[in-house]
Amino acid sequence: MLVDFISHNESGYFSKLMLDYLNEEEAIKPLYHRFASIENFKEQLIEKQSNFSEQKREQLIIALKKQYSNKNISEATQKNIDKLALANTFTITTGHQLNLFSGPVYYIYKILSVINLAESLKTEYPEYNFVPVFWMATEDHDFEEINHFNFRDKKIQWQSNQTGPVGKFETEGLDKINDLISIIFGKGEKAQKLKDLFSESYIKNNTLTAATFHLTNELFKNYGIVIVNGDDVILKNSFKEVAKKELFDQVLNTNITQTKQYLKNYFVQVNPREINLFYIDKGIRERIVKDNDQYKVLNTNYSFTASEIMKLIDEAPEKFSPNAILRPLYQETILPNLAYVGGGGELAYWLELKSSFNAFNTTFPILIHRDSVVLVSEKIDQKIQNLNISYAELFLNNTELTKLKVKQYSSNLLDFTKLKTQLANQFDALKIVAEKTDKSFKNALDAQYTKQIKGLNNLEKKLIRAEKLQLNDKIQRVLNLKEELFPGESLQERKQNFAQFYIDCEKNLIETIKKEINPLKSGFKIIKI
């Protein structure tokens, strides 16, 4: 149940670039194609339909059927894969790393955002079909980012010495994690379901890709989610012409360098390389660099001439892996995609890419900021009411929150605003006299006013500190409550895993969240579970 809504602007957790994008500021309009509104999808549909070939659809269907072979495919997902063969079917996509047991809970929000958006678009444009897609980042190689998840106050971490693309990692060692969660998840029907889900995903599958596929499929298959693994020879074959152009013409580097003129007042999320491709093989994923007339793979003995690497792309396109800034082009080349749903960090680097998409004659997707959520239990919600705290106040940092609540809870006068106003009025009256006397008197008057205002400010701070000591127990309860919802003064959705909320939720967690998700009206949604 939705109990409150905090806008992006009010939350204090969004970058200036994201706020300017969401507020449709003129300065960054050149960085995107169409803004995220239901009306703008009509033109997006027509444009994507005109430049996404039948051949690409055929290749996509072949790849998906191969990836889903021997998988437990739901009726809803099977229907969506079949629909993708039709020219009037389009995708709405989000993506995520292969975090252990999904990682942070915003994984849930991203996927529900594309599911709900696809449903909304079907209502608005019934003559078309819309398929929610989850893109698994199987080619990433930063194991430290994905090898853990947090359950309550415990960090569950997988140790492995494997290297290369994480999707190819074998699930060795995860039996120890399985034994651990069988204890810490506790007892009860829901806890047992999660234990079974972990075991079925990570113990019964040999690779991290297969494990993540099973996990995501089991959680969302009834909503028709289609899971795509980009580390696929068929899909890479559809992308090889883009890869060639990136290798030999360095298109992204040129275009993004020009785009940066619009980003000079913002933090740049990702900087391009001269070549934005990796070479992947068993145990390695390393950058390709050009050294005179040779194309070399860093930290290996691989080296190719221009003709040799051209031949390799044609014969083995699966050995070439886009980096984070080229991956969006790969995705949009092989999918009939209309929109990408992501977090602020993701959308920031998409905003660097529009001119590169133009260079490859590829439709730039509508960028949609995923919904953000704070999940609260009935017990916590009652505590918040008892302490007379608003959810908006909990978005303040601890110092600001403490100061605000001390003033609110205190029976003493802690705000010296009226005294400062009275002082200012008295000195204004003296200034009238000062103007008729020597300049030195006016200077002395100004100095005295500054001194007394400073004195009042210091007294105000000291009084607040003293009152804080008197109210210490109540303020500590406020801060403890804040810590439960904003662990370490960070966002709950970036710290906690879905498992603890799944166990605590009185109803079906995913259904409870899904009812409130609407990425076209995104913000922070406070949902009581």
Image: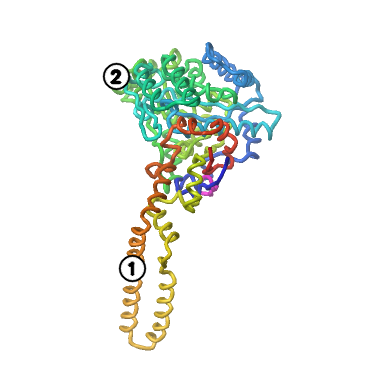
Amino acid type assigned to the residue bearing label 1 in the image = Leu
* Residue in the picture at 41% in, 72% down: 420
Nearer-the-camera pick, 113 or 176 = 176
Q: Quadrant of residue 411?
A: bottom left
The number of discs equals 2
* Residue in the picture at 45% in, 49% down: 394
The circle drawn on residue 300 is: 2
Q: Position of residue 395 (x, y in %)?
A: 45, 49
The answer, for residue 294, to whether it is visible in the render is no
Q: Position of residue 320 (x, y in %)?
A: 41, 20
Q: Secondary structure at mark 1?
A: helix
- Colouring method of the image: rainbow
Q: Quadrant of residue 80?
A: top right
Please state which of the two labelled residues, at mark 1 or mark 2, is closer to the viewer. 1
Q: Secondary structure at mark 2?
A: loop
Amino acid type assigned to the residue bearing label 2 in the image = Thr
The answer, for residue 218, to whether it is visible in the render is yes
* Residue in the picture at 37% in, 32% down: 273
Figure quadrant of the N terminus:
top right
Q: CA distance from mark 1 to mark 2?
A: 66 Å
Q: Which is nearer the N-term, disc 1 or disc 2? A: 2
Q: Position of residue 127 (x, y in %)?
A: 71, 28
Q: Is residue 400 above or below residue 113?
A: below
Q: Which residues are magenta?
A: 21-27
The circle drawn on residue 23 is: none
Residue 493 sits inside the magenta stretch: no
Q: Is residue 167 above or below residue 103?
A: above
The circle drawn on residue 459 is: 1
* Residue in the picture at 54% in, 23% down: 334
Q: Position of residue 524 (x, y in %)?
A: 51, 43
